[in-house]
Amino acid sequence: TQLLEQSPQFLSIQEGENLTVYCNSSSVFSSLQWYRQEPGEGPVLLVTVVTGGEVKKLKRLTFQFGDARKDSSLHITAAQPGDTGLYLCAGAPNSGYALNFGKGTSLLVTP
Amino acid sequence: EPEVTQTPSHQVTQMGQEVILRCVPISNHLYFYWYRQILGQKVEFLVSFYNNEISEKSEIFDDQFSVERPDGSNFTLKIRSTKLEDSAMYFCASRVDSYAYEQYFGPGTRLTVT
């Protein structure tokens, strides 16, 4: 099993601040996906990164895949209370294989 | 926008009983998955299914578990004799084809075994 370590585990910031959360592994992944999960709901896909060094932007969210495809980061600019949630990274060794999930970063953005 | 649906949203059952969790994947998707998430823990893979066959399963997916696609739209997970430790959120996911990486998850079924 390819383990994914996410950090920090918890993050509490004020509205307007910037933040970065990390997803690290010693294994190589063919792709990494970032999900956001609300309590009692299913993970909602935010983005998929596939190519080493790839950067993708989704409004105020910037996702990067490490050059060696072992790690990824999520940067949020000017966080808003609506960004509050659990951010999960998940990777698979090859397309279609079982996703291995990290434990997530729980983000709280206060007004 | 098409989405994965799951029923029921919450199932309470007694230990030793059989339960069937139902999922309707996105209509043109070919690959189907079940995951579970025990309260406070990470999402864990159970099984993947393609072309009416299991393509991969984890060590969690023992003989008490089975999956089936009984018709063209439903995908089910059966737990034959539930244990207390089976209490968890169960998520169904689907993927469109072999070229895609993305898996789309349903809202989950909360299974409580008493």
Image: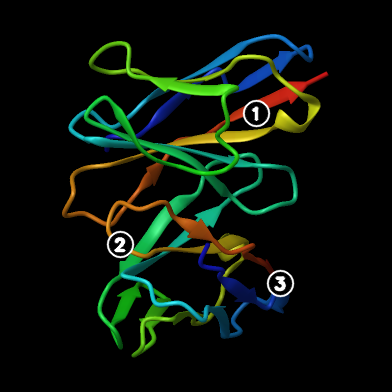
Quadrant, the C terminus of chain B:
top right
* Circle nearer the N terminus (3, 2): 3
Q: Marks 3 and 2: which is nearer the front?
A: 2
Determine the CA span between mark 3 and mark 2.
27 Å
Name the kind of residue labelled 3 in the image.
Gln
Horizontal relation, residue B114 to residue B33: left or right: right
Q: Nearer the viewer, mark 1 or mark 2?
A: 2
- The answer to whether residue B93 is above or below residue B80 is below
The amino acid on which the numbered mark 1 sits, given as a three-letter code, is Arg
Q: Chain of mark 3?
A: A
**Residue lying at 80% horizontally and 26% vertically, measured from the top left:** B84
Q: CA distance from mark 1 to mark 2?
A: 29 Å
Q: Where in the figure is residue B102, as x and y percent of width and height?
A: 30, 54
Contact? badges 1 and 3 (CB < 8 Å): no
Is B99 displayed left or right of B19 in the figure?
left
**Same chain letter for marks 3 and 2:** yes
What chain does mark 2 sit on?
A
Q: Secondary structure at mark 3?
A: loop
Left/right of residue A110 with respect to residue B73 in the rendered view: right
For residue B110, the mark is 1
Residue carrying label 2: A94
- Residue B86: in sight, yes or no? yes
Above or below for A100 versus B39: below
* Image x and y of residue B47, in percent: 45, 38
Tell me: A31 left or right of B85: left
x and y, in percent, of residue B106 in the image:
45, 36
Q: How many C-alpha atoms fall within 10 Å of the one at disc 2: few (<14), some, or many (≥20)?
A: few
Specify the subunit that label 1 lies on.
B
Q: Quadrant of residue B4?
A: top left
> Residue under circle 3?
A9
For the N terminus of chain B, give its image quadrant. top left
